[in-house]
Image (cartoon, rainbow, N blue to C red):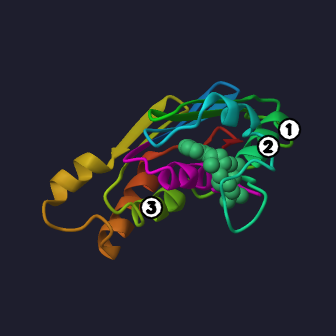
Amino acid sequence: MRELSLNVLDIAENSFKAKATLVEISIVQKENLLTITIKDNGCGMDEDFLKRVVDPYTTTRTTRKVGMGIPLFKMVAEQSGGNFHITSEKGKGTVVTATFLVDHLDRPPLGDIAETIVSMIGNLEGSDLVFYYEAFGQDFTLDTRLVRKELENIPINTPEILVFLRDMIKENIKTDYRGVSL
Ligand SMILES: Nc1ncnc2c1ncn2[C@@H]1O[C@H](COP(=O)(O)OP(=O)(O)OP(=O)(O)O)[C@@H](O)[C@H]1O
Ligand SMILES: [Mg+2]
């Protein structure tokens, strides 16, 4: 995978499959460390399953025998001088954290995170998403629960609303600063 935003999409997809009603995605850059966290309140995993989940042969998929979302994210983090961590509690939810060294030669670029977040918002149905982004000293939060309130009776997945949200994210997140690019 060439872009971290695609890994984020993969991990969040797990959360929605796990019936999460709230998924919180946080991307934070502090100096040379980039930390990506995906937290959900879905079905969670028991201790035994959790121990095996970084193995590609651990999946509850019925369409194929391998599950690559978690192993790939772990691999990319470790290849970028960072770490990978997952905690989960059955019936409560899951937290996936991956860190990356910003200046590491093997760190993939973040990619089009605005587009990625908006594609998730387009498929939320009843669930909600919180997106928190902090980089180069500037932060931004988008909470679909608040957006829905503002929209009153207009569905959040209306194409015009999605375009508006995408542009709002793009305008409010700093992905480049003084020659450093996330
Ligand atoms: N957030 C989560 N909540 C509950 N279970 C999860 C969560 N994330 C992963 N799992 C479980 O771990 C398994 C492995 O996840 P992983 O993303 O590595 O592969 P996959 O989702 O099965 O397949 P792929 O990601 O390749 O489509 C999943 O099948 C699911 O059972
Ligand atoms: Mg997956």
Q: Which residue position is annotated with label 2?
A: 76
Name the foreground residue: 43 vs 131. 43
Magenta stretch: includes residue 7? yes
Label 3 to label 2, Cα distance in Å? 23 Å
Q: Which residue position is annotated with label 3?
A: 118
Q: Which residue position is annotated with label 1?
A: 79
Q: Earlier in the sequence, mark 1 or mark 3?
A: 1
Residue in view at x 37 percent, y 55 percent: 168
Q: Is residue 55 left or right of residue 156?
A: right
Crowding at mark 1 (Cα within 10 Å: few <14, some 14-19, many 20+) = some
Crowding at mark 2 (Cα within 10 Å: few <14, some 14-19, many 20+) = many
Q: Is residue 72 left or right of residue 10?
A: right
Of all residues shown, which one is farthest toward the top?
31
Q: Amino acid at mark 2?
A: Val
Q: Which residues are magenta?
A: 1-23
Is 164 placed above or below 177 here?
below
Q: Position of residue 164 (x, y in %)?
A: 34, 64
Asked if the residue at tag 3 contacts the one at tag 1, i.e. Cβ–Cβ closer than 8 Å, the answer is no
Is 129 placed above or below 93 here?
below
Q: Main secondary structure of the magenta part?
A: helix
Quarter of the figure with the N terminus: bottom right
Q: Earlier in the sequence, mark 3 or mark 2?
A: 2
Asked if the residue at tag 1 contacts the one at tag 2, i.e. Cβ–Cβ closer than 8 Å, the answer is yes
| Residue 55 falls in image quadrant | top right
Q: Position of residue 57 (x, y in %)?
A: 81, 50
Q: Is residue 69 left or right of residue 79?
A: left
Label 2 to label 1, Cα distance in Å? 5 Å
Q: Amino acid at mark 3?
A: Val
